[in-house]
Amino acid sequence: MKKLISVVCVFAMLFTCLVPAFASADYPFKTSDGVVRDPCVLVHDGKYYMYGTGLSNGQGYGCVVSEDLENWSAPMQVFSPDESFDGYCDYWAPECHYYEGAFYLFATYRAKSTDKRGCGIFRSSSPTGPFVLITDGHITPKEVDCIDGTLYVDEDGQPWMVFVNEWTSREDGVGAMSVVKLSDDLSRLVSQPKEIFRADDPLWTNDHVTDGPFVYRTSEGNLVMLWSNMALTGGYAVGMAVSDNGKIDGNWLHYPKAVYKQTNKQADGGHPMLFTTLDGQLMMAIHSPNASSETTHETATFIPMQDNGKILVRADGDFFSRVADVILGIVFDMYRMLSGLVHNADNGGC
């Protein structure tokens, strides 16, 4: 029996030593090692797939894989343009969505034919590609700069794209957020784009940027959008808007303060998206800081969030900030409901 116990202990010790070696070989990089902007995390089959600007091996789009959000694989290419592809630079902000049995990449690139930035939609049977363009080049309006497309599927199963009318093509230099209906196969538009708000609408900012929209429905049915602009106090930041009627093309009301901004305890950061971890925690992914320096670089940052039914709040805040968020959230939700009633009345009822 003693010999058997000794043999078991030896095997246990060997297993303990070997597992980290295998893990480090498969996932050699820490989150903080990667230089990445606009991170998007897809959770699929027990793993995390992160896409983002800067993860490509050359032109195109790339992805890294993890089992714990801390240790990541080497970057792998999910789309590489050939000579026939219309894009030539600005391969930005790839977002991967699982929809109707396939994986779809919503991604930005600058076109040779127009020299404008726009969003294309790519399809694959695997989260690691290869992805194939299914739209006729840019699916966004081709005559202006548009970036940061994201997928939203409404309660009737209708797919929409939310995208940025970039400030670079606007006469007044102020960006805007727009929504548009997509065909069921996501290959074309089936409505005209509708502008839903401008960059300088909220109280927490008066700047010109409308980056990184991401749409989420709360447990009580409120439709929330996270996005980014510059905070009044400085630095890249994350804001939140809520639809007054729960519809993507409704009247969007802006939460009065930034969800995330630069403080003396944290760097600035933004371009948010949401995912749920394998253990059930709602998480916001951003890149932070917003610029590299001699001492730091942009990298993915994961922030635990809480869905309180009304809005989204940070789950890592101190007690007083969380209480303040709850109170402000209740007041804001009352304002949202009142605005919805007024909006419906102005449009002749429901």
Image (spheres, rainbow, N blue to C red):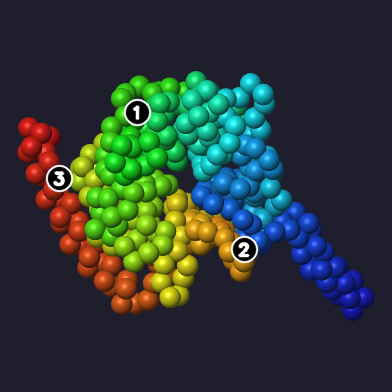
Q: Which residue is mark 1?
A: 181
Q: Disc 3 vs disc 2: Cβ atoms closer than 8 Å? A: no
Q: Is residue 321 above or below residue 164?
A: below
Please tell me whether mark 1 sits on a helix, a strand or a loop: strand
Q: Is residue 245 left or right of residue 158?
A: left
The total of numbered circles placed on residues is 3
Q: Which residue is mark 2?
A: 32
- Of labels 1 and 3, earlier in sequence is 1
Q: Amino acid at mark 3?
A: Gly
Q: Quadrant of the C terminus?
A: top left
- Of labels 2 and 1, earlier in sequence is 2
Q: Which residue is mark 3?
A: 340
Q: Amino acid at mark 1?
A: Lys
Q: Residue at left 49%, top 58%?
A: 290
Q: Residue at left 56%, top 47%?
A: 52
- Of labels 3 and 2, earlier in sequence is 2
